[in-house]
Image: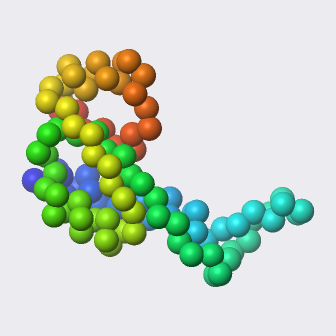
Amino acid sequence: MLLAVILLAIAGILAYVVLSDRSSKTADVSSGEQTLSKSQPAQESELFVYTWADYIKPELVQRFEKENNCRVTIDTFDSNEAMYSKLKAGATGYDIITPSS
């Protein structure tokens, strides 16, 4: 459980960085510079997690989504072999993967 909390805290930090980068900067095409913009609403980002089935409580995910204004998509696996096979077959796009040691 402690590991799940730590992983979600790390995910929160990553989501915050991604969200603040996307919502606070705009590109000025004419000068090639980025400028701060208060008028743009924060975009909702999505965090992709690949983890063990029943590893993270749904209530914790809902709280994380609410606090960080993002959506969490969780794919699960039931063994390290299944996880490895999916990744080796080309599955990409995960922000956090939690295999066992």
* Residue 29 appears left or right of 9: right
In the rendered image, the quadrant that contains the C terminus is top left
What is the image's colouring? rainbow
Residue at 84% x, 60% y is: 29
Q: Quadrant of residue 54?
A: top left
* Residue 82 appears left or right of 49: left
Residue at 18% x, 62% y is: 60
Q: Residue 77 location, x and y as percent?
A: 19, 32
For the residue pair 16 and 46, the one nearer the viewer reads as 46
Residue at 68% x, 77% y is: 37
Q: Quadrant of residue 65?
A: bottom left
* Residue 19 appears left or right of 56: right
Q: Residue 57 location, x and y as percent?
A: 13, 56
Q: Residue 58 location, x and y as percent?
A: 16, 58
Residue at 57% x, 75% y is: 41
Q: Can residue 17 be seen here?
A: no
Considering every residue shown, the one lying at the far bottom of the view is: 38
Q: Can residue 41 be seen here?
A: yes
